[in-house]
Image (cartoon, rainbow, N blue to C red):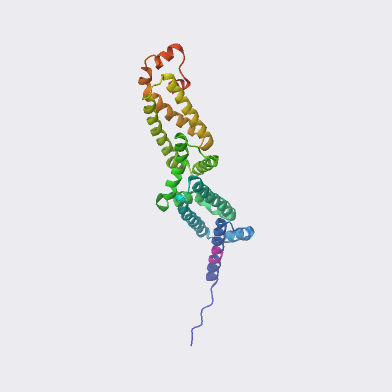
Amino acid sequence: MLPIPAPATDHSRHRSEISRTLLTLSSAFSDFYAGNAEHLSYYTLYSCAYNVVAADHGEVLYTQVATNIATEVEKLAASLYSAASASDAEFLRELLGSWKKHCNAISMINDVVMYMDRTFIQKRGKARVPELGLRAWREGMLDGLDGEVPLRLQAALLGVAGRERAGEAVDVALYDLTASATKMLLELGDSVYQEFFETPFLDETRWFYARESARLLALPCTCGEYLRTVESMIDAEMARVSRCFDARMEEKVVAVVLTEMVEKNVARLVGMEGSGLASMLVDGSYSAAFRTACRR
């Protein structure tokens, strides 16, 4: 005689119902990332999340939300791998498109789990959903795929200044993409912005103007001509910052130009016979670049 299965207990039925609810939410979160949210009911999803938390399973839902977000970011990062060989503009366009998908999905997920945020996350002192989204992007996009995406991003951002300094024309669209990408890095945190852009950008700027100072000083020119060239370089850097980068970069990049072009060459500039800084100070013809360097 076959054994008669034991009737399901209230506990097992409850656990099964919670599992189905979590699967429903997980599927919805994937749809958010895929841009397929039109067929979903916000009220139904909110109720699902509410019921899970009300049943004292806030930790389970929180863990699943974090896991779902991390998984979706990994998928986006993998899709960007093939775009790494594209042009700077195309790569940045793909990256920023993925970033927009991520931000939109995080906003929708945050709305769905609003009850969990009020009654579980804040009381437990856990990272809220927007922070989970930033963390997942930092770890999955900037630390994953053996560094392919962050290295490509860095190369694209540095490439704008490199091409302009070399006298090449840069498409206006690339300025906008670069500005949006640097804004993304800032949203991910100052340390991320500094690591992936600001520090390498200032290092390349320092290297470039150290070479430029040596090249220009090897040419036959007066001190006034040299300083006027420095002024035009500063103007170009300030214009680039206003088009592409965070405004706080202006002071830093100007400081680098002045250090490499003027401060490190003061003795040489002062000693230029008949046209050095000493002569310019006597007749009052010293330039704005020199006045700025003196104020530093």
Magenta segment boundaries in residue numbering: 19-23
Residue drawn at (44%, 39%) of the image? 194
Give the percent coordinates (x, y) of residue 287.
46, 19
Q: From this viewpoint, is residue 23 visible?
A: yes
User: Eyeballing the image, is 154 above or below 13?
Assistant: above
Residue 178: x, y in percent?
51, 41
Query: Most prominent secondary structure in the magenta stretch?
Result: helix
**Residue 110's x, y, as percent?**
57, 52
Residue most extreme to the top: 282
Q: Is residue 77 left or right of residue 112?
A: left
Q: Quadrant of the C terminus?
A: top left
Nearest the viewer among 169 and 65 is: 169
Q: Say which of 75 and 21 sits in front.
A: 75
Q: Quadrant of residue 213?
A: top left
- Residue 262 vertical placement versus 101 (above, below): above
**Residue 110 magenta:** no
242 lies left or right of 281 = right
In the depicted view, which residue is nearer to us: 193 or 264? 264
Q: Which residue is found at the position 37% from the left and 23% from the top?
A: 265
On the image, the x and y values in percent for residue 61 come to 52, 59
Q: Is the residue 235 above or below the residue 139 in the image?
A: above
Check the image and report above or below for 25 versus 11: above
